[in-house]
Amino acid sequence: MKKKSLKYVLATLIGVSLVILVCLMDKIDIKDVEILKTGNNTLSSHTVDSNSRDSKTVNLLNGKTIVIDPGHGGVDGGTIGLSYGTIEKEVNLTVAQTIKQQLEERTGATIILTRDKDIDLGNTQKEALRKRIQIAEKASADLYISIHHDAFIDTDVRGITTHYSSHHKESKNLARIIQKSIFKQSIKAKNRGIKETDYYVLKNNSAPAVLIELGFTSNKEDEIRMNSLDFQSKTAISIVDGIIEFLAS
């Protein structure tokens, strides 16, 4: 008798629950269903728009040629870190390759490295510098970006500097845009600003050109930072941001 009563109670509860559910469903406004559908459509549209924007970004700078120059190479190792023995030519190449990758992923520009491995570009330093210019001239480069790391006798000197030459009237603006872009990132480095300098690769370039010193190997704090993958990635991204801003304007 108890078992039958229990079954009866359960059956009654289920029946009441179904009735309540039907009543609630009847009260659902059709607009609520439309909102849910709209939400799904909005998500799909957003995905399409994102792909469209990515496509436009890839097509950005189509027809432009950008030369990325990793300073030094081969027997010319550049500066050497005082605290950890960082070899400048190696970090120059790492950053330059990251910039190239970012530019190829984000734009349709043709990207040329003056060297893609540890090689000499000439038998002498002057010959190597001439070769860098020849590469840019042969490619009819629209932009020339040279990547370096500095050093100084005073180990307290630190920070990032972007150099330009007044030889090309647009180079100063390029330097300003890139330096500003670098420091939009949270990199905890000293901003040394932009500086007019008659480096060979700057004053002898037909294209707007800058030389970026991404820290001092002679400063312990900078040397640690320049070997950080996070710093290398952030600076590469911000340099690419600056390049896009300059060429797209």
Image (cartoon, grey):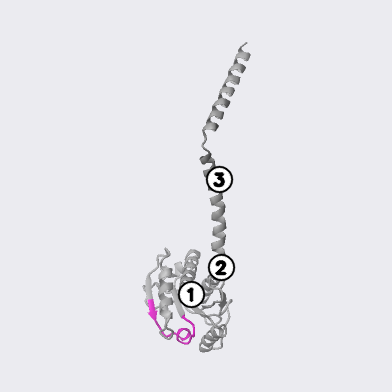
- The residues tagged by marks 3 and 2 sit, at their Cα atoms, a distance apart of 32 Å
At 55% from the left and 72% from the top, the residue drawn is: 100
Viewer-proximal residue, 170 or 118?
170
Name the residue tied to disc 1: 247
Residue at the extreme front: 30
- Find numbered disc 1 in the image and state the secondary structure of the residue it sits on: helix
Query: Looking at the picture, how far across and down is residue 32, in whole percent?
Result: 51, 40
Query: Looking at the picture, how far across and down is residue 204, in whole percent?
Result: 47, 87
Tag 2: Cα neighbours inside 10 Å, few (<14), some, or many (≥20)?
A: some
Q: Nearer the viewer, mark 3 or mark 1?
A: 3
Viewer-proximal residue, 246 or 20?
20
Tag 3: Cα neighbours inside 10 Å, few (<14), some, or many (≥20)?
A: few
Task: Indicate which disc, 2 or 1, sits on the residue closer to the N terminus.
Answer: 2
Query: Looking at the picture, how far across and down is residue 157, in whole percent?
Result: 37, 74
- The residues tagged by marks 3 and 1 sit, at their Cα atoms, a distance apart of 42 Å
What amino acid type is highlighted by mark number 1?
Answer: Leu
Query: Looking at the picture, how far across and down is residue 184, in whole percent?
Result: 41, 65
For the question of whether residue 248 can be seen, the reply is yes
Viewer-proximal residue, 172 or 131?
172
116 over 24 or under it: above or below? below
Asked if residue 196 is among those painted magenta in the image, a careful observer would answer: yes
Asked if residue 3 is among those painted magenta in the image, a careful observer would answer: no
Residue 58: assigned label? 2
Magenta region, residue range: 194-208
At 45% from the left and 86% from the top, the residue drawn is: 203
Which image quadrant is residue 122 in? Answer: bottom right
Name the residue tied to disc 3: 37
What amino acid type is highlighted by mark number 2?
Answer: Val
Tag 1: Cα neighbours inside 10 Å, few (<14), some, or many (≥20)?
A: few
